[in-house]
Image: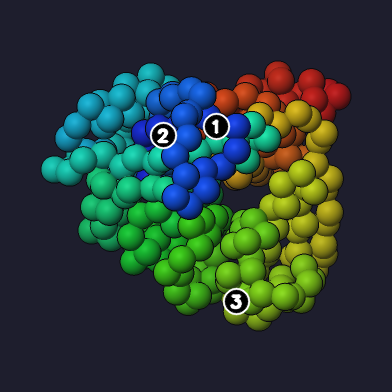
Amino acid sequence: MIAVIGSSNVDMVINVDDFTLPGQTQKGLELSYYPGGKGANQAVTSRLLGGEVYFLTCLGNDGNAQMMKRELEAIDLGNGIRYVDSPNGVALIEVSSSGENRIITYPGANSHLSPEIIADSRESLLKADILLLQNEIPFESTLYAAKLFSEAGKTVIFDPAPSSNIDKSILRYVSIITPNETEMAELAGYNLGIEEATAKLHKMGCEDVLLKRGNKGVFFSGRSKSLVVPAFKVRAIDSTAAGDVFNGAFACSLDRGLDLHASLRYACAAAALSVTRRGAQKSIPRNEEIGSLLGE
């Protein structure tokens, strides 16, 4: 079983030819609303790929919250919802014609996901063997959850996104950290090579480092071995949530008992397929699609 503690947002996506420059006004090509939030994206990915998932999240008191409620309950992820008196979290996403994105998030209800709420859900959470965490809820809550699962002997996977305001003391409770290249630089320091940066994170206490490199694949550095898994070649139209799909698929694969290399390839395939379609949770592939890309 997989536990996910994290954010639920409604993504407001505007497609443009090129990113808007400072001082520039341009006409958007298309406006869409999608269920999102890093926590929800990862939880939904694991669930749609067949995992048993408990998702602890906070929803607000507005129409966006009702949209998220419908989406989560439709796939049996409603048991961990907590409602708070606040607007729901939202993300404003600009997507260029090349498929790259820029994102601004407003936390809203996500800022109410407190250590007390986590403690109140402790019994349900600790039924899981794997915990997925991100950084879109209060950091004190993320740290509390990581420590809770680590001390219970569970696997803690931490996606340090966004990478601001992270107290590196959390690394001693993290089994696998999964930054992208920008987040790696912010955590370990700029102008470092990959091996130097991962070694630095190991020294900070992190057991395993899984660097997500987009169309360059992934680099895994463990205490005893390193692995490089190339990306699958696809035509990207929207990279929104690709990292979340990777994490959700990776956790689901590990939970099934697949080995590390197979889990990394499975997650790379899932992420590759996700960038070929628009939206966050709407872009999540299914098992048969992943198997086809893997040649299975």
Query: Which of label 2 and label 1 is nearer to you?
Result: 1
Query: In the image, what residue type sits under mark 1?
Result: Val
* Marked residue nearer the N-terminal end (2 or 1): 2
Residue 15 seen in the current view:
yes
Residue closest to the far bottom: 203
Residue closest to the eye, 3 or 19: 19
* Marked residue nearer the N-terminal end (3 or 2): 2
Mark 3 lies on residue: 205
Mark 2 lies on residue: 11
Label 1 sits on a secondary structure element that is loop
Residue at the (78%, 47%) spot, across then down:
217
Residue 101: x and y, percent? 57, 42
Residue at the (80%, 25%) spot, across then down:
293
Residue closest to the eye, 104 or 116: 104
Residue at the (66%, 74%) spot, across then down:
190
Residue at the (48%, 28%) spot, across then down:
28
Residue 261 seen in the current view:
no
Label 3 sits on a secondary structure element that is loop
Q: How many marks?
A: 3
Residue 113: x and y, percent? 28, 52
Q: Is residue 5 above or below residue 175?
A: above
Mark 1 lies on residue: 16
Q: Is residue 236 above or below residue 250?
A: above
Mark-to-mark CA distance, 3 and 2: 34 Å
Label 2 sits on a secondary structure element that is strand
- CA neighbours of label 1 inside 10 A, class few (<14), some (14 to 19), many (20+): many
| Residue 254 relative to residue 159: left or right | right
Rendered image coloring scheme: rainbow
- CA neighbours of label 2 inside 10 A, class few (<14), some (14 to 19), many (20+): many
